[in-house]
Amino acid sequence: MASGTERAVLVLGDHVRVSVGGEAVYGKSEADYDVDGIVRQVHERL
């Protein structure tokens, strides 16, 4: 992965969470589910 990011994580279940390099990109409890927006944010961090 670019810029030294070691991993990207997608956790599914009752609470969806996406993080890149340990930094939260999306949390179901925090925002509406927008796949395109999530992908854009993950791409920016990779």
Image (spheres, rainbow, N blue to C red):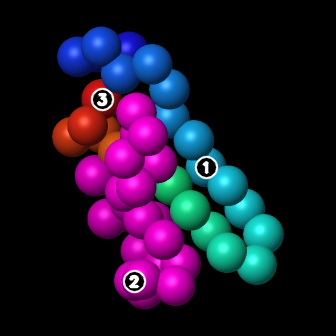
Tell me which segment is drawn in magenta.
19-41
Where's the C terminus, which quadrant? top left
Residue 39 in sight here: no
Residue at the image position 43 percent from the left and 40 percent from the top: 22
Please, is residue 36 above or below residue 39 in the view?
below
The residue that disc 2 covers is 31
The answer to which of marks 3 and 1 sits earlier in the sequence is 1
Neighbor class of circle 3 (other Cα within 10 Å; few <14, some 14-19, many 20+) is: some
Q: CA distance from mark 3 to mark 1?
A: 14 Å
Residue 18 place in picture, x, y as percent: 51, 55
The residue that disc 3 covers is 46
The answer to which of marks 2 and 1 sits earlier in the sequence is 1
Please, is residue 24 above or below residue 27 in the view?
above
Residue 18 in sight here: yes
Q: Residue furthest right?
A: 13
Nearest the viewer among 21 and 32 is 21
Left or right of 8: which side holds 24? left
Q: For the residue marked with disc 3, what is the amino acid?
A: Leu
The answer to which of marks 3 and 2 sits earlier in the sequence is 2
Where's the N terminus, which quadrant? top left
Q: CA distance from mark 2 to mark 1?
A: 15 Å
Residue at the image position 37 percent from the left and 47 percent from the top: 23
Q: Secondary structure at mark 3?
A: loop
Residue at the image position 67 percent from the left and 75 percent from the top: 15
The image quadrant of residue 35 is bottom left
Q: Which mark is residue 10?
A: 1
Q: For the residue marked with disc 2, what is the amino acid?
A: Ala
